[in-house]
Amino acid sequence: MFRSPGVRPGGAPPVTRGDAHGIQIRDVWLNRGPTPLFCGLSLDLTEPRIGLVGPNGSGKSTLLRLLNGLMAADRGDITVAGLNARTHRRDLPTRVGFVFQNVDHQILFPTVREELTFGLVEQGRSRAEAREEAERLLALHGCGDWGDRAVDALSEGQKQLVCILAAIAPGPPILVMDEPLASLDLATRLALAARLARLPHQIIMASHDLDLLATFDRVIWLDAGRIVGDGSPGEVLPLYRAHEMARAAAQDTLS
Amino acid sequence: MMSGYLAGHSILHRLPAGLKLFALALLSLLILPMDAPWRLAGALVLTLAVYAALGRAALARVGLLRPLVPLLVLMFVLQAWAGDWTSAGLEAGMASVLRIVLMVLLADLVTLSTPLQHMMDALETVLRPLRPLGVSPRKLALAVALVLRFVPVLLSAWHAREEAWRARSTRRPSLALIPGFLADTLRLADRVAEALDARGFGRGRGPHAE
């Protein structure tokens, strides 16, 4: 694998600023099993911090998976940082990093350095380049001496930080996160949230942590694949909270 | 083979992974026909000396053999019984047990001193001749690497199930735990496949793409 200026391996067009900003979802249809989930979903995701809320099974995780090419829409188009998700699936990891909830399900290697270099090597970098980039990234995030550390010896919060660094290592402008902080204690969650706030990346995060989402630029409320609310956290979150509390009360009387 | 890499800077750490794997294969071939217990015991003492030289953390890994003890006892008893409890039978039993322990410890010396990435590279080189048969060396090497990585994760999944059992029962955990554990394993496999995909593995770029 080699690179020369202007020609990217895999034939992906070079990213240019302007036409390659954020994510455009156009008339997306997707069935989950026999039941339709998304029926003509259209969204422009350009704000730096976007939160997704909704009950379990509402389609948050599915929507996130469409953005990284983990799933493909049955119909419709998704453009991610200027790339068509369907035709440029192989290049999507360099545009969208994905962070899952459970660290044990996504850390693939026993040491931190190997974990960070893996995605880079998968994107066609040489071992030496990947190693150098991993060290640079660790130093940049104040973990300069983590390279040799065994992943199993890290705390939960440190593991999640490794997952985040591994996702941004190939240099994607967008970071997609599926409840990344859910299993962490409060102090760790706040510390990681502060780190995330400092990242230059566009972040799209599914979360049940309404306090965290209150600091975001935009919140989208999904239910059964439909958009119920979409706007600033100040507009959407109070309505969502009231709705969920009513739902909880209804469930209570049913039992 | 029992748990992963142990960071360090010993001579053993600096040897190339391919050489270590080759030496391990060669030693295994030498040990296999050895049947004098005193020779095997001597080799075991030498191996333990290497562990001791690597430090306390390495020596602690010898303790990870403990789950093997019932199996080793069973092996010894079977061998001795097959030899009618004569001294030759007892000796054969001793030899089998020592041989297994020696081989496991030698193999773990390679695991603990070799970063997984180096192990994968060495395996890829060894597997390269299989490429004309349609085998992807990198995929196979990664599969081996993932097995090593997920042994501790699977162990902790088993312990979690066991703990949930103990929390509600005074009886010993039974075979009833196995189906749930298998379901955990399959779920884990799905998630890991997804994590690999999310990082671009198998999407037709990277070193395995021809």
Image (cartoon, grey):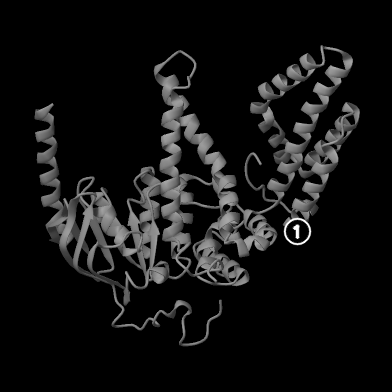
Residue B168 shown left or right of residue A222 in the figure: right
Tag 1 residue? B16
The subunit carrying tag 1 is B
Q: Quadrant of the N terminus of chain A?
A: bottom right
Q: Residue flagged by tag 1: what amino acid is it?
A: Pro
- Location of residue A226 in the rendering, given as x and y in whole percent from the top left corner: 14, 56
Q: Please identify the quarter of the rendering in which residue B56 is found.
A: top right
Nearer the observer, A183 or A216: A183
Residue placed at 86% from the left, 13% from the top?
B86
Vertical placement of residue A14 versus A120, above or below: below
Residue placed at 80% from the left, 29% from the top?
B98
Furthest-front residue in view? Answer: B133
Residue A19 shown left or right of residue A3 in the figure: left
Q: Please identify the quarter of the rendering in which residue A129 is found.
A: bottom right
- Location of residue B88 in the rendering, given as x and y in whole percent from the top left corner: 88, 18
Q: Quadrant of the C terminus of chain A?
A: top left
Nearer the observer, A207 or B77: B77
Numbered label tally: 1
Residue placed at 90% from the left, 28% from the top?
B38
Residue placed at 64% from the left, 39% from the top?
B2
Nearer the observer, A142 or B3: B3
- Secondary structure beneath label 1: loop
Residue A249 seen in the figure: yes
Vertical placement of residue A91 versus A190, above or below: below
Please tell me how crowded label 1 is: few (under 14), some (14-19), or many (20+) other residues with Cα within 10 Å.
Answer: few
- Location of residue B131 in the rendering, given as x and y in whole percent from the top left corner: 62, 63
Furthest-bottom residue in view? Answer: A6
Residue A110 seen in the figure: no
- Location of residue A72 in the rendering, given as x and y in whole percent from the top left corner: 30, 62
